[in-house]
Image: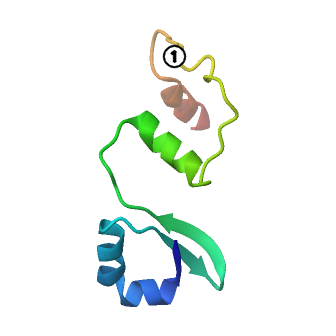
Amino acid sequence: MKAVGIRELKGNLSRYLRKVQAGEGIVVTDRAKEIAVILPYKLEGEEDKVISLIQQGLAIWSGGRPKGLSSRIRSKGKPVSDAVLEDRT
């Protein structure tokens, strides 16, 4: 991936976005420190996106499926956020 500074990116944004659209990734730097990555957007399944990020070294997966995320805690009455706001006044 090509690295580009913020000033260069701002000055030539259209040119760099065309490169991204063509499939090239860009690393954005600030004073030679990597701060962001611009990657082409592809319509893929969520799993494909995650696998792609792992393969590129942009994400780490320790294996397994997160536990406890499928069930949601349900409560009766008003939302907790409303109770917190009432308590603050």
Quadrant of the image occupied by residue 45: top left
Q: Considering depth in this image, is 55 or 78 the residue closer to the camera?
A: 55
Residue 57 position in % (x across, y down):
62, 54
Residue at position x 48%, y 89% from top? 7
Is residue 36 shown above or below 29?
above
Q: Specify whether 82 is left or right of 34.
A: left
Residue 76 position in % (x across, y down):
47, 9
Kind of residue indicated by mark 1: Ser
Q: Considering depth in this image, is 23 or 59 the residue closer to the camera?
A: 23
Residue 70 position in % (x across, y down):
51, 16
Is residue 12 shown above or below 1?
below
Is residue 21 shown above or below 53?
below
Is residue 33 shown above or below 42?
below
Residue at position x 62%, y 23% from top? 66
To which residue does mark 1 refer?
A: 70
Q: Secondary structure at mark 1?
A: loop
